[in-house]
Amino acid sequence: MKPVLKPVVVTRAEERDGPLSTELKSLGLPVLIWAAVRVLPADTAQLEDALHRAGSFDWIVFTSRHGVAAVTARLPAPPAGMRTAAVGRATAAVLKQHGWPVDLVPAEPNAAGLVAAFAASGTASGLRILYPASSRALPALAAGLTHLGAEVTTVEAYRTVSGTELDVADCRSCIARNAVGAVTFASPSAVTELESALGKEDFARLLSLAPAVAIGPTTARALTERGYTPTLAESATLRGLALTSLHAVRAGPASRYP
């Protein structure tokens, strides 16, 4: 008889049949949806104005599927001459699903990796780059590209806000019963918001009982800065996050109490 695995917490903005939940369930893992963040539409005036002028940009860079969705809903294909960069394979895959070519995907799936890829090309200076970003986008990408001599136009493409529908009492009940196998984090915002919702004591208790699994280095850093030792997903994709979560559940707690 197969052992019964504890459920994995999904903190990203998705429903019970969302993409990460589906990946986890395909591996035989039960799922708890603790959506610590929500993604909402932004005020579209700035984005639409930038896309109106899309032909004036040399590149457009994407760091999430939400940015892809916001842009492709208004621009079915990039204008001639504009090239496309994606921060990682998952974002690149979503672009390709929408029929967009992807010209650049860095070896390291994070902002620093994307900046390094532009630097390696030796042609960043003078480039006009459009960056459709989250309302909570970290400055590393725009600052790094600007440092290379590019002219970066950052526009808010979507808003990342607190997950107000999170049932905190139910979450705390699961923590008290030690009923969580692992906790997945797909963004630094999810780390911040779950800690805020649960309170530092219960957040620490949770991660002393269940390993934290981060999709990439930037998200992992949000945990290490708080004193935790997360497990990094084997690849910066939802599939990689799910596979690493399976290994983490089988291995048991890996994070330490700060």
Image: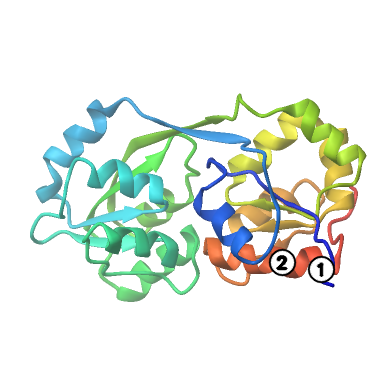
Q: Does residue 88 appear in the picture of this structure?
A: no
Identify residue for label 1.
250
The answer to whether 50 appears left or right of 170 in the picture is left
Q: Which residue shows up at 84% across the image and 62% down it?
A: 254
Can you say whether 235 is above or below 225 in the image? Answer: below
Q: In the picture, residue 153 is in which quadrant?
A: top left
Label 2 SS: helix
Question: Which one is nearer the viewer's eye here, 164 or 116?
Answer: 164
Which percent across, then down, holds residue 171? Answer: 78, 34
Q: In the picture, residue 236 is in which quadrant?
A: bottom right
- Disc 2 marks a residue whose amino acid type is Leu
Label 1 SS: helix
- Disc 1 marks a residue whose amino acid type is Arg
Marks counted in the figure total 2
The answer to whether 250 appears left or right of 189 in the picture is right
The answer to whether 217 appears left or right of 54 in the picture is right
Question: Which one is nearer the viewer's eye here, 255 or 22?
Answer: 22
The answer to whether 73 appears left or right of 119 in the picture is left
Identify residue for label 2.
246
Circles 2 and 1, Cβ within 8 Å, touching? The answer is yes
Which percent across, then down, holds residue 140? Answer: 48, 51
Colour mode of the rendering = rainbow
Q: Which residue shows up at 84% across the image and 72% down it?
A: 1
